[in-house]
Image: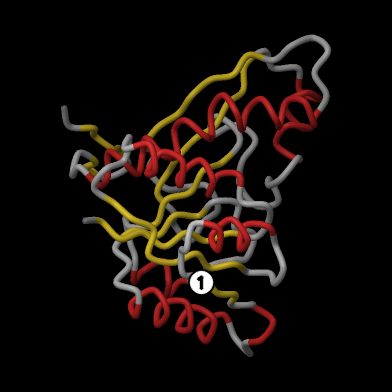
Amino acid sequence: MLKIGVLVSGGGTNLQAIIDKIESGYINNCRIATVVSSKPGVYALERAQKYDIPSTCIIRKNFSSIDDYDNALIEHMESCGVELVVMAGFLSILGERFNNYYKNRIINVHPSLIPSFCGKGFYGIIPHQKALEYGVKVTGATVHFVELEADAGPIILQKAVYINDDDTPETLQKRVMEEAEWDILPQAIKLYAEGRVVVDGRKVRILS
């Protein structure tokens, strides 16, 4: 049984997608051991409480250095037996210590088709604004392993979403979540839990 720790900072819609797929049996060999929020009072913590999932809040500004913050996160994850860390809308920066400790065991969902509209500063609504400004016809979401450089780790899964002529950043963000993020993030967890994800340098192979 794979134990995952989910990192959140807001409403937790991606967390809910994971919970739903576990509840439905789509992901049947994994459980959420802990939900950790970077902010107090966010709705993601209420979602966790509703399903009796242990949760806590670990705030970056309460620590004097990024190493101290990393150590607090590592200590908590280890105490919960976490084997895979899932970033589901987590907006705090993880340092080198955390990244090295969980190398190839941290995954993130990003709201674009990496390498487009990604990297430092591209979070929340911004990738959707930039996609519309650039005039691309297709965007989507990417699940990738996390490295110290933002959105630079090996890609696990991607899913495309076509852009409509009347899209706004808000409508596009909603559709990318519903059509792509909520699909490929649980799918990546399922594949990892089944031992079907193999990192080979910069590439990820999915075993049949």
Q: Dividing the image into 4 quarters, which one contains the C terminus?
A: top left
Q: In this view of the protein, which residue sits in the foreground, 92 or 53? A: 53
Circle count: 1
Mark 1 lies on residue: 95
Q: In this view of the protein, which residue sits in the foreground, 117 or 17? A: 17
Q: Percent position (x, y) of residue 38?
A: 63, 69
The vertical placement of 98 against 186, above or below, is below
Q: Secondary structure at mark 1?
A: loop
The vertical placement of 129 against 132, above or below, is below
Left or right: residue 14 versus residue 23 is: right
Q: Residue furthest bottom?
A: 64
Residue type at tag 1? Gly
User: Residue drawn at (75%, 40%), measured in percent from left and top?
Assistant: 125
Q: Percent position (x, y) of residue 46?
A: 63, 61
Left or right: residue 176 versus residue 190 is: right
Q: Percent position (x, y) of residue 188?
A: 36, 39
Q: Residue furthest top?
A: 165
